[in-house]
């Protein structure tokens, strides 16, 4: 095994993934719906893998021992198995940093598992095509399948029981359409219920879950067409419809799943008011209280200033379509993530 450093960007789902397929192996982590995303240049994870005497995981400068670490080892086992190598997987020290402009509340399993996947595949000498890396990343976290690719990405749900046709494909590159995504932060805390548990509860108890699943494919096709045509009003309409359908099915879960806070709602209204006044942006919200706003770069600065002034908003991060995930073998064995980056990560 070779020491490796990998980088992967987070992504925002413009058409959402929410829910897992049933009747298939849970290990495959197959989604009930497809999804379509934009990879985000401003939200990056850097991960190094080093040969070690025992497995160890450090995240943003702190050792991690709990279930989060267990998920990392499990994922390394998966990639080792996919590499077809004999014998036990070598122990590894995993050092990972979220290079996000502000760390609070934005930690991403998408960029984390994408970076870990490509780092481990490179370290183990596994020569897998990006589509296969993406499928492996999906087993760590569904949204991570999309972060292997830059630009705009569609993850197809597929129907094969072994998941072989559940594939992420890059639709258009980062230079196709330099859209801006504003991440409007409305809290510093972590979300109370993680996506995996939330999805399961929603599937089991929400009367709106089935219609959510049944109507997703039409949204994906409409979003893909609007993306290819660079038609922001058409794309924005689907983006908001997909988001609010997902949240409606979350809220109808028993007990309810409400990921928003008061500021979330205020920001949504502010975006809609700005749009009515000719400053066009479209909102989307994940399983947390932050609001993500899709807009043209020409309106980004004015919209950003307006949203930053909303009471309760902690900050606004501006992102553009980002690059593919990459990995490189390190020439030196000692851990070499630069100190400057560490300061940025802990700021
Ligand atoms: C609301 O990818 O975090 O952000 O596969 O269980 O790890 P697991 O879920 P995860 O879910 C993301 C849900 C979402 C929408 C999306 O990113 O598509």
Image: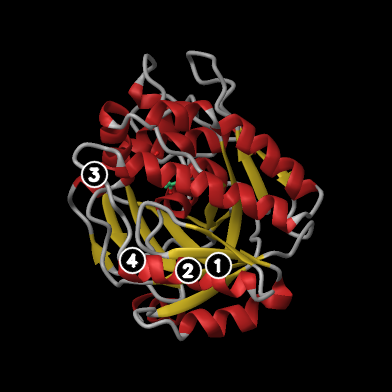
Q: Give whichever of discs 4 and 3 has the lower sequence position.
A: 4
Residue shown at 33% from the left, 42% from the top: 250
Q: Position of residue 245 (x, y in %)?
A: 46, 42
Front of the two marks 3 and 2: 2
Instruction: Check residue 256 in the rendering and tell me which mark sits there, or answer none.
Output: 3
Asked if residue 179 shows in the view, the reply is yes
Q: In terms of depth relative to the viewer, which is nearer, 269 or 18? A: 269
- Crowding around mark 3 (Cα neighbors within 10 Å: few <14, some 14 to 19, many 20+) is some
Residue shown at 53% from the left, 44% from the top: 242
Q: Give whichever of discs 3 and 2 has the lower sequence position.
A: 3
Position of 289 compared to 160: left or right?
left
Residue indicated by mark 2: 269
- Crowding around mark 1 (Cα neighbors within 10 Å: few <14, some 14 to 19, many 20+) is some
Mark 3 falls on what kind of element?
A: loop
Residue shown at 22% from the left, 57% from the top: 64
In the picture, which quadrant includes the N terminus?
top left
Instruction: Check residue 182 in the rendering and tell me which mark sits there, or answer none.
Output: none
Give the answer, above or below, for where 169 lies relative to 179.
above
Q: Position of residue 283 (x, y in %)?
A: 53, 60
Q: CA distance from mark 3 to mark 1?
A: 26 Å
């Amino acid at each position: 095994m070779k020491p490796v450093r990998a980088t992967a960007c987070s992504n925002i789902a413009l058409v959402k993934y929410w829910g897992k397929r049933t009747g298939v192996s849970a290990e495959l982590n197959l989604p009930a719906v497809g999804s379509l995303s934009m990879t985000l240049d401003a939200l990056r994870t850097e991960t190094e893998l080093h040969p070690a005497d025992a497995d160890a995981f450090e995240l943003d400068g702190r050792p991690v021992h709990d279930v989060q670490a267990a998920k990392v080892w499990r994922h390394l086992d998966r990639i080792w198995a996919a590499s077809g190598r004999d014998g036990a997987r070598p122990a590894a020290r995993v050092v990972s940093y979220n290079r996000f402009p502000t760390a609070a509340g934005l930690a991403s399993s998408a960029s984390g598992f994408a970076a870990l996947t490509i780092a481990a595949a490179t370290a183990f000498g596994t020569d897998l095509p990006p589509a296969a890396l993406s499928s492996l990343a999906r087993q760590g976290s569904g949204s991570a399948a999309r972060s292997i690719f830059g630009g705009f990405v569609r993850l197809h749900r597929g129907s094969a029981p072994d998941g072989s046709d559940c594939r992420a494909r890059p639709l258009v590159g980062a230079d196709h359409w330099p859209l801006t995504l504003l991440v409007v932060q409305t809290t510093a805390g972590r979300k109370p219920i993680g996506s995996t548990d939330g999805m399961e509860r929603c599937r089991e108890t929400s009367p709106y879950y089935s219609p959510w699943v049944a109507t997703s494919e039409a949204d994906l096709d409409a979003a893909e067409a609007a993306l290819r045509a660079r038609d922001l009003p058409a794309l924005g309409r689907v983006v908001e419809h997909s988001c609010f359908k997902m949240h409606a099915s979350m809220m109808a879960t028993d007990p309810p799943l409400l990921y928003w806070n008061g500021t979330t709602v205020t920001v949504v209204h502010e975006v809609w008011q700005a749009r009515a006044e000719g400053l066009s942006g479209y909102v989307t919200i994940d399983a947390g209280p932050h609001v993500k706003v899709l807009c043209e770069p020409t309106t980004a600065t004015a919209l950003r200033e307006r949203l930053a002034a909303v009471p309760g908003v902690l900050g606004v991060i501006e992102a553009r379509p980002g690059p593919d995930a990459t990995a490189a073998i390190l020439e030196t064995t000692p851990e070499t993530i630069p100190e400057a980056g560490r300061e940025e990560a802990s700021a």
